[in-house]
Amino acid sequence: MKRKLAFLFLIVVVVPMFLAIFTTTRLVTSHLTDMLQKRARDSLAVAHNFFLSTLDEMALKVQILAQSKDIREAVRTGDVIELIDKVHLANRHLKLNAYDAVTEIYDSEARLLAGEPCTKYPLCPKSVVEQVLLGKILTFREIIDGHLRICSAAPMYHENAPGPIGVVVLSLFSTHQFAEEIKKIIGTEMIFFGFVDDRCLMFGSTLREAGERVLIDISAAEAECTMFEKPVAARNFLFQLMPIEAQNGRLFIATAVEKAFVSEMIAVLGSNLVNIGIMSVLFAIVLALMFSRTLTGPINSLVVSAQALGAGDFTHKIGVESHDEFSFLGKTMDDMRCEIRSTIEKLKNAKIQLDRQVFDLSLRNLINQAIIYQKEGDLIKGILDILRQTIRVRVAAMFLFDHATERLELTSVDTDAAEGITFGRIFVEVGCGYAGKAAASAKAIVCADLAKEPAAELAREPEWVKTAGNLLALPLSGDKGILGVLYLVDHPQGFSEADVELLSDISVQIAIAIQKAQLHQLAITDGLTGLYIHRYFQLRLDAALTKARRRQEPVSLILFDVDHFKKFNDTWGHQIGDKVLKQVAEITAATVREGIDLAARYGGEEFTVIMPNTSLEGAVQLAERIRTNIEQATLVQDEKTISITISLGCAAFPEHAVDKENLIKAADEALYRAKQAGRNCTVAAG
C-alpha cells in the first residue's frame, strides 16, 4: 500500500514536472531563438540608423566646410598652400580624421585644388562637381575599385562672387574600422558588402578568427533573404540584411549574431533544468515517502483494525493518532466496534437463551416421544437413553421407590456399550447415599468432584459412581410421595446451575410420565400374575392383525392352560393355586421375546401369547420352550415338590383364520386336542 501510494504520488508529481520542464525548455528555446532574431533585427536597425546619422553628419560637416570663411578666401585667392593648411585645421576641428575621411576642394572650373589627406587624383567624378556648382548639395554612395565610398558635396559661395566659387567634397570609405565603430554601438558583429556584376565585395567586417579578420563570401541567393544562417570560421552565425541605395551595384549592411551564444544559453538552461528535475525527483521521492507514511500509517492501522473486526476480534480499541479525517474515521469505526460488540454480546446471550430453550423443548419433545411406551420399564429405558445422549453424560440410571419395602431399587442403567458397565439389583435406604438423600430431601443433589468426597459417603454407591467425576441426583415426586431418583453421572463440563434448573423441570415431567405409566400398567395388567388382562389382549390382537394385513405378514397365537389346575385348589388350597398361576406367568414372561411377543392371562388358569410376524412353526417352537421351562420348574409346599404341566394349542393368521374370532377359535380347538392327547404337549391347528 505504501509503495503504491508513493509510486502514484511520483507519477502525479514527477510526470507533470518533467512535462513542465520539457515544455519550458522548448518554450525557452523558442523564446531565445526569437530573442536572437530580434536582437539581430534590432542591431541591424541601430546600425542602419547609425549609418544614416553618419551620412547626415557628413552632409552637415560638408556645409560647415563650405561656409568656412578662411577656406572660401583661400579658394577665391587661389592660394593652394593656405587652402591646404585651412582644410587641415578644419578637419582636425571637425574630427574627420577619426573616419578616415578625405576632404577635397574643387574650383569653379571643377578642378581639384587641394585634398586632405593628399590624393593623387580626384576622387569625386567631374560630373558630380559640375552638378554641385549648379548650386546642389549632393550625398551619394558608390562602389569604386572594390571599395564603398560615401560622398557628400556642397558648393562654396563668396559675397563678392555671383555664383559658386568652388565645391567641397567629403568622402568616407567604408572600412573595417568603420564597421568596428558601429559594433561598439550595437554590440554585435556586422559587415558591409555589395555586389558588382554578381560579384560579392566585402567593404567592412568585424568578424575575426584568431585575431585575423575573416572575410566571408555571400551568395546572391543569400542576399535575397532578409535573414539567413551561415558558418564562419567553424562558428554558426545568424545574419540579418538590409539593402542600402548605391550609385552603382547593390549595397547591403548586415548584422551577425553567433548562435553558439544561444546554444550555450540553452545548454546551460537545459543543464539547470535537468539538475532542478533531479533535485525535484529526489525531493518528490522523499516527500512521497513522507506523504505515503503519513497517509498509509493511519490507513494501515485502520486496515489492521478492520481485519481484526473481520476475524471477530472486537476487544481491541480502534484509534488513529492524528488530527484529521482519519482520526474521525477511527473514532467512528471504534464506535461501530463497540456497537457491534454490544450487539454480539446481546445476540450471544439471546442465542444462549434460545439454545437453552431449543434444548429444553427438544429434550421435552424426546421425552414426550418416549412416553408413547405403555410399559413402565420401556419408558424408563427410553428416557435414560435420551438423557444420556442429550445431556452428554457417561451414565444415566433410575432408582424406583418400592412402597412395600420402603427402599429405592436400581431398576435401569443406560450407558455406552463400550463402557462395559454391568449392574445388579441394588437397594438403597431412604436417607442413605446420594439417591437416599435426594429422596429424603426431595431436592436435587449436585456433587461437582466425587474424588473429594469421603470414602464412607461413596461406600453404598455403585462402582461406576465411585470412579466418576461428578454426579447429579434428581428426586422424582408423584401425587403420593417419592417415585424414585434419577442419576446422571460424569458430565464433561460439570453440571451448571442452568443444567440443574432445566433437569429439575424435566424431572417433574418424567415423574408424571412414570406415574401415568405405572397407572396405565396397573390398568392393563393382571394383579395376580402381572400379565396383561384379557381386554388388553383383545386390543393388541386386533392391532397385530391389522398390521399383518397391511404388511402381508403372519401372526401366530398360542393358547394354553394349566393341567389339572382344579386339583391344586382342591388339594393344596387356593393360595397354592395362586402361586401356581404366578409361577406359570413368570416363566412365560421370561420365555417370550421381550418387546415383540405379548403374554396375557386369558382367564382363570388359561394364558395366551400373541406372536407378530411369526409363522406357525415358530409358534410351536416357542410353545414347546414354554412347556419345557414350566415342566422343569418345581413348586415346594410343606417340603413337598409340586409339578406343573401345561397343554398348548397353536394357530396362525392367515393360515388357519382371517379374523380374530376364528383365530382364537382355531387355537382353542388345538388346545382341546392337546388335552385329549394326554396333556403336557403342544398341538398345532390342522
Image (tube, rainbow, N blue to C red):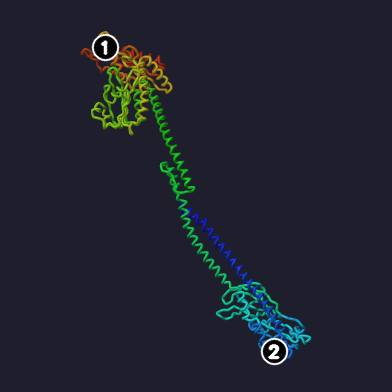
Going from the N terminus, do you reach mark 1 or mark 2 first? Answer: 2
Judging from the image, what secondary structure is the residue with disc 2 in? helix
Q: Is residue 529 left or right of residue 75?
A: left
Q: Is residue 430 left or right of residue 390?
A: left
Instruction: Look at discs 1 and 2 and give the one toward the viewer.
Output: 2
Looking at the image, which residue is at 27% across and 23% down? Answer: 431
Type of amino acid at the residue the image marks with label 2: Leu
Is residue 576 at all visible to an observer of this figure? yes
- Real-space Cα distance between discs 1 and 2? 201 Å
Type of amino acid at the residue the image marks with label 1: Ile
Kindly identify which numbered label has been placed on residue 51.
none
Rendered location of residue 312, percent (x, y): 42, 41
Residue farthest toward the left in the current orientation of the protein = 639
Tags 1 and 2 touching, CB below 8 Å? no
Residue farthest toward the top in the current orientation of the protein = 570
Rendered location of residue 496, percent (x, y): 35, 31
Judging from the image, what secondary structure is the residue with disc 1 in? helix
Q: Quadrant of residue 88?
A: bottom right
The residue tagged 1 is 576
Looking at the image, which residue is at 74% across and 81% down? Answer: 137
Q: Residues within 10 Å of mark 2 (few under 14, many from 20)?
A: many
Kindly identify which numbered label has been placed on residue 83.
2
